[in-house]
Image: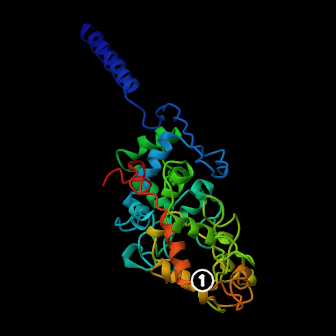
Amino acid sequence: MPHLVTLRRLFSLAAATALLVAACKPDKDVEQAFPAPTPLTLARPQDFPAIVPMPADNPLTEEGVALGRMLFYEKKLSGDGTISCGSCHQQSKAFTDGRARAIGVGGQQHARGSMALINMAWEQDFTWDGAHTKLEQQARTPLENPVEMHQSLATSVTKLQATNNYPKLFGRAFGSSRITEENVLKALAQFERTLVSSNSRYDKAKRGESYLLPNELQGKQLMGHATTFVRGAECQHCHDTELFSGPTHTFFNNGLDLPPFTDPGRGGITGVAFERGMFKAPTLRNIALTDPYMHDGRFKTLEEVLDQYSEHVQISPNLDPQLVNSPNDPSKKIMLTAAEKQKIIAFLHTLTDSTFITDPRFSDPNP
């Protein structure tokens, strides 16, 4: 009997010990608690219009932006692990890639060139045809497009979840270490909204920190509207305000081609015949760094671009009227002189922001 009592005590002790160990062992199904992320305010540069309101469900935070930066340069988001968003949007080139048309996984060529990512917090139309009106929507397209990064977002989430660092980074940014497609897109959008360029020589001159040369000032004036008494190149019609980009929800046929258009542009999204061949007017900020030009990169230099607008506009029914009703010349074309073109180009070079292309906040965190 004493032996039986002793055995019972031993079994009871073992059971109690097992319960204690089980109680102390972390439960993988219990979500780790994370502190609230740190709010981040995006400053509005001098003379810039109001920032487009941030989505209520995706406010800027320090942790969200830091995560978005990591994801922007993360090659695990591509099908073969060779490219990232930063492959086609390189900081040194004002977040373009220097190619006429973007190159995706396996060397596949896209039909269009990579657009610059500049002052995205003020934009409401994304991509050349305005297919998306929210950054959170737009990011999915290049990630999953077979000729771009060619990987489903669901697969990307699985890859990220299996890493040692990303679950914790998502937890800090969004309060949960369980990675979701939605939060991947939100983080990328947060980072892209911080890509602000407002420190060019043009901006410094406006702040009284520098000055523009006479030919640059004359180039700035020439970019305006032509009148009976003042010559102008009509650039500001499509590249307005201090952003130097197209008005919201506005697209243009700028006379590159005659119908039928190889690339339908905006018309391919809306199905409206009149909008075929129309495209978004990208920003002119850092334009000297973003060659080649146009949606298909057909022009290698700014000189070629100005030659096109000055003398070679193709007339079609939906051509922007500002390009064929100029009082500069009896032909109604803009017809700039060689000297005027060089003055405009001189001004465009003042829009280069060297701090933007070297800012460590926008660079690859793991080069």
Residue 100 vs residue 109, the one in the foreground = 100
Question: Where on the picture, by quarter, is residue 271?
Answer: bottom right
Quadrant of the image containing the N terminus: top left
* Amino acid residing under circle 1: Leu
Q: Is residue 61 above or below residue 107?
A: above
Quadrant housing the C terminus: bottom left
Judging depth in this view, the residue of 118 and 22 nearest the camera is 118
Q: Position of residue 351 (x, y in %)?
A: 51, 62
Q: Position of residue 136 (x, y in %)?
A: 59, 56
Q: Residue at x 68, y 73 (%)?
A: 251
Residue under the image location 66 percent in, 44 percent down: 56
Measured as percent of width and height from the top left, residue 358 is found at 38, 54
Q: Is residue 126 above or below residue 339?
A: above
Residue 282: which quarter of the image?
bottom right
Q: Is residue 247 visible?
A: yes
Q: Residue furthest left?
A: 3
> Is the image coloured rainbow, by chain, by secondary structure, or in one colour?
rainbow
Outermost residue on the top side: it is: 2
Residues 71 and 47: in front is: 47
| Residue 110 visible in the displayed image | no
Vertical order, 182 against 352 (above or below): above
> Image check: 237 left or right of 22?
right
At x 54% / y 61%, what residue is drawn? 139
Q: What residue is disc 1 on?
A: 336
